[in-house]
Image: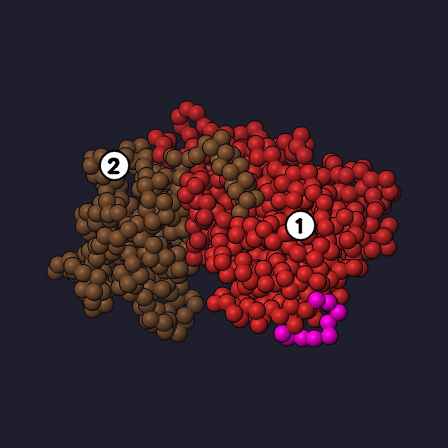
Chain colours: A brown, B red
Amino acid sequence: MDNLKTYAEVTWCKGCGNFGIFTALRNAILKLEEKGIKREDIVMTAGIGCHAKIFDYLNLSGLYSLHGREITTASGFKISNPNLKVLTFSGDGSGLGEGLAHTLFAAKRNMDITMILHNNSVYALTTGQFSPLTQEGWKGPTTPKGSFEIPFNPISLLIEVGATFVARCYAGDINHLTETLIRSIEHEGFSFIEVLQPAMPYHKWEEYRSEIEFLDKEPKTKEEALNVARNSHRFTLGVFHQASRQVYHKGLYEDHNPIINKLSRDARLDKIRKILVIKNRK
Amino acid sequence: MVNDIFTFLVGGKAGEGVKKAGSVAAHIFSSMGQRVFQMDDYMSLIRGGHNFSIVSTSTKWITSHYMKADLLVNFDKRSCETHINDVADGGIIIYNSDEQEDVDGVGIPFSSEAEKYPMKNLMYGVGAVAILASAIGFKKEQMNQSIKNQYPRSIEDNIKFANTIYDIVKGGCQGKFLLSKGEKERPIITGNEAISLGAIAGGLDTYFGYPMTPASSILHFLAKQAENFGLAVVHAESELAVINMAIGSTFTGARSMVGTSGGGFALMTEGISLAGITETPILIVLSQRPGPATGVPTYTEQADLSFALSAGHGDFLRIVASPGTIEEAYYLTAEMLDLVWKFQTPGILLTEKHLSECSMTIDIDVDKAKWAKPKMYQGENYKRYHDAEDGISPMLFPPSKEVIKWNSYEHDEFGLTTENAEMIAKMHDKRNKKLKALVEYLKSQYTVNIIRGEMTTNLFAYGSTYMSVLEALRYGGLNPTIVQPIYLNPLPAWELEEFRNQDNVVIEQSSTGQFTALLKEKAGLKIRSTIKKYDGRPFDPIKLSKKIKEVL
């Protein structure tokens, strides 16, 4: 299955932005393979929602997680085997609603994983309720008079809490998305890509196309990045922030790998005997 | 001293070294070859309040502290008033003469003496050790050696203070409780240390936790030992993160464990259900404290049993087992780690504050621990959920040329989401087959601890209550048959068959009798009476033996 597809029937709506993400991702993996990254080292998790269906379609190893917990599952992968390249697919409801705390903590820790946030600004699979990224005034089944909460700014939020690669892409620009995905996966640290993605029953491509713009240049510092993220249009694409900072697993155990360098049973039992002796004297 | 048992109680405010003094006493007894059981009672606060530590010691195996103490050291008036009735016949009360008078005991000017040192109240614990040393007939040199070993900071001040107290207390209690030498020196560990060491011996690679009494000390111990054993030990943002990180970790082949108490466990149930459908081997330590909700954080109870047995939505196998002693906690943790890997399903090691945080002298055969190892897949065209005869699909971990899909949705054998009617039923059947395989396996294992007695009544207890019952029977000179099921799900009904229509009494720490209900439902036992305690405190062997006598 060299096209990285499984046998699953694809059930995204016709014209859904998820197709663009699916294509860009497969392109990115093939290009990463050309650069020497092994496909079997790439593993993924997904939350629950339309975004997450990609788990069934993409022929890669991984764990189809719970709604909002995809980031924690991905963190678990990385912590136990840091040799793996970990991707986590998320949605605006999953990653910034149910799983908001996990997303912020993964960024705070600079967990070396790539989070791809499919932003369709709506709870699509559960029939159109407003999401943490929905603009004010949205009339969904839970907000019949229109939503009156303000949406998060995911870019400035993630820069603020410590993500070291933060970008916004658009499912309609596959080349830009592919290149950004490659950069984010190669980046050591927590990478966050918000992908603007129309959901067909709720949006039209034209609403996006007419608004899309690119950053003039990539900000150099965190302060500058925050400034740009706060003041730019929510359809502004590009890499807002990239920085280098110690990743979580290095802080935890430096260059160790708990699975690959697992201590043998005999060595463990010897050490346990020593602990039991020392405890007695101390 | 009753039955050759000597009990030392030390009480005072948090921050005065109460627990430390108890633990130093325990080590002094153990260095004399004695057996020891230590219980710490503390409030949910950082400074002040009233804490106490009780250490009972004997030359014979001892499985509980005694609430009647032979030597009581009270650092303040509150402690003295609290424990005025906890003194055994012939016992001695030490009180703080700076705070009170007219107590029938030996007064020590703790406050004014400690005031002379920069560490002030922190000196109290050292004072308690000095009083104990005098009472058990230690020479000053012996005492000083113990203090040097146990209080490595400000050694000079500590020794000076100890000598002052030793001299003051001389007339009142020197040599009053001479203890005999026991057969050999033994290590002292807490239940949570036994659980941690058992997990390491069983192959643990990763541990995830969020602080919650009484499980926190597992997280602390493992964090400290992480480098020594090459483990990853993570303090995550919530129990939701904890369980899901652990499941992710297991996906890569790591033997993973998590630990918590009732409230945290409630949050974890979502993930336990995920472990059920993804067939994730994962061990969860649930150390019970009184609930519901925040309940009473630093005390003990057994009221999460029914919750543990059915934790997580949906049909799936949960293995639940509970250690009766601290030694068993070591073996059982390794065994449970092995079991969850053999059967690829979540397992719950159910325990209580009483076992988690009490410490005792132990005889552990380190090598007897099991080692968790999965059934691995060989060959191509891997299917994660291959419908094997016993329901157990061989495993593969990344990196692998084969694609490995674990799925929280109902799935086909490869692991892709399905809504197909036939497949849904087939996967339920596949997972359910594991129960049959597990029961067959457990039939060859030690699943119930039975001590045969000579009376017609059988006593049933699980978890740390078993230790309380053992001590109560020893104290009361009673010998009914004791039955302690180690496994609670599946409950080994095959081992309990013979007791069905006999005269059975249950002893447990749940106000509604959850264990009694389980025995009735799953083993069909006729139960005449249940002795319950649900005030957060563990049973006292003297009081419990009276209650047992009443029902026998």
**Label 2: chain letter:** A
| The N terminus of chain A, quarter of image | top left
Residue B99 belongs to magenta span? yes
Number of residue marks:
2
Q: Residue furthest top?
A: B379
**Label 1: chain letter:** B
- The magenta-colored residue range is B98-106
Percent coordinates x, y for residue B417 in the rendering: 44, 42
- At a point 66% along the width and 54% down the height, the residue shown is B55
Q: Which residue is mark 1?
A: B37
- At a point 40% along the width and 51% down the height, the residue shown is A72
Percent coordinates x, y for residue A79 in the rendering: 38, 45
Picture layout, residue B536 above or below residue A16: below
Picture layout, residue B126 above or below residue B552: below
Residue mark closest to the camera, 1 vs 2: 1
Residue type beneath disc 1: Phe
Residue B339 visible to an observer of this rendering = no
Q: Quadrant of residue A216?
A: bottom left
On residue A198, the disc is none
Question: In this orientation, which residue lies closer to the viewer: B268 or A6?
Answer: B268
Residue B382 visible to an observer of this rendering = yes
Whether residue B150 sits left or right of residue A164 in the image: it is right
Whole-number angstrom distance, CA of label 1 to CA of label 2: 57 Å
Q: Which residue is mark 2?
A: A37
